[in-house]
Image: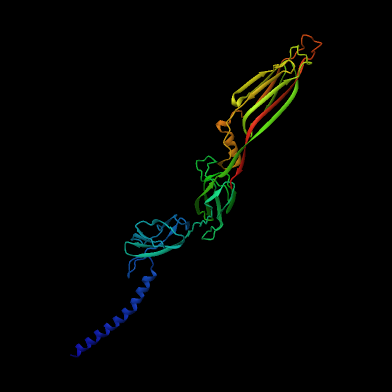
Amino acid sequence: MLLNDVLARRFMVEAALSSAASHRVFPLLILSSLLLSGCVNPIGPPEPTANLSVDIDSINAGEPVNFDARGSNSPEGTVITEYAWEFGDGAETTSSQGLTSHVFDEPGTYSVSVIVKNDQGGTDFTSWTIHVNAYPDISLSVPFLTKVGKFVTLDANLSADPDGGLLLWAWSLDWVDSDGDGDATNEVDSTESSITMMMNKSGVMTGSLTITDDMDASSTEYFQLNVTTRVWRVVWDEVRVSYASEGYLYQGETWSFIHEPGEAGRLLAVNATLTLEMDLLLHQLPQDNFTLKLSVPASAWNEEQQTSQEDPTKAPKAYLDAQGMNSVPQSDQTYESDNRDELLQRLLDETVGRYGQGNWTWQIRADQADPDLIDELDPDEGNDWDLEIEYVIITPRITEVV
């Protein structure tokens, strides 16, 4: 029995020593596993190393960013199988490839992270900070309604960049393709923050304002400005305009004169009289003979009259007379027009009032002015003439109705 007791005691001592040794070795194993990064871990799966890059880290809201984690690696004998992405705006995605893209719709600063996982269950984590630029806020003040001849102010001074950047202004005030590039909205009429201008034309002026910040982010706002025309009162006044001229012509000579008598009104009538000097008051001698001619090309009007002696005691005369050339419009009417000159031209261009417009060419030709048969009584080789013209014209008196 004594031997059995000794063996039992020895077994108990060896067991105790073995237990103590194992408590010292276990912490060493744990420490060794922590120091061997990316290596086969006797405690857990081998871990990959995450790596992340981007094509651009400062963008405008709504623009895409490409994230690239293909530079991540995993210990020999393991393969990366999954990339778990978090974009910082609540969006998440998982991919088997290390490349993805994301669009940030709202401005701000976002921390984008990726967790790389291999086929042994090991993981690693890394992140990147993205700044998303805000678009300029346009505050535009444009009157809805104005009138031709009035000044208006288009004001965008209260516009701002939420990020505090500098702003550039580009106004397109009326969509007319003046540079011929096929786009009527891309022409810059002003780069000021506000514009004051006079409206010269009625209708709807459609335009736009584009504001760009120092990150090349642009905001555009379109506007319409309704421009009403002006109202005018027209009263027609009758006036008489006279022209007179005189001269001397040898036989075969011609005198001419060009003018535009109805330039500012509507011609109603014209009366012209050509008078020759009488030869020594000797009525028995043949009197000189002249021709009065008128040409108005715009109205295809050509007319001529020869002098004649109605009374042997009076000088030869030629008459040219035209009445009722154009209709007489109703007076004291109102019209709409952007400006006075446009209305005047419209009134003068009416079909019923155009006759006689344009240049008038008057011509006097000395047909017969040689000395008569009795040379000593009429030795004059020419003759004096006198021309008198009177026009009846109605002119519009235009006043604005306020």
Structure colour scheme: rainbow
In the displayed structure, 47 sits above or below 149; it is below
Dividing the image into 4 quarters, which one contains the N terminus? bottom left
Q: Quadrant of residue 16?
A: bottom left
Q: Residue furthest top?
A: 373
Residue 160 point in image, percent of width and height? 53, 58
Who is closer to the viewer here, 146 or 317?
317
Residue at 37% in and 73% down: 31
Q: Residue at x 56, y 31 (%)?
A: 352
Name the residue located 19 percent from the left edge and 88 percent from the top edge.
Answer: 4
Considering every residue shown, the one lying at the far left of the view is 1
**Is 226 or 85 nearer to us in this picture?**
226
Residue 358 in sight here: no
Residue 321 in the image: state x and y as whole percent.
64, 24
Q: Residue 92 appears at what percent x and percent y?
A: 37, 61
Q: Position of residue 196 (x, y in %)?
A: 59, 51
The count of marks equals: 0
Q: Residue furthest bottom?
A: 2
- 166 shown above or below 187: below
Q: Is residue 118 visible?
A: yes
Residue 235 falls left or right of residue 83: right
Residue farthest along the right direction in this orientation:
376
Left or right of 385: which side holds 395? left
Q: Between residues 381 and 166, which one lies in front from this camera angle?
A: 381
Q: Quadrant of residue 2?
A: bottom left
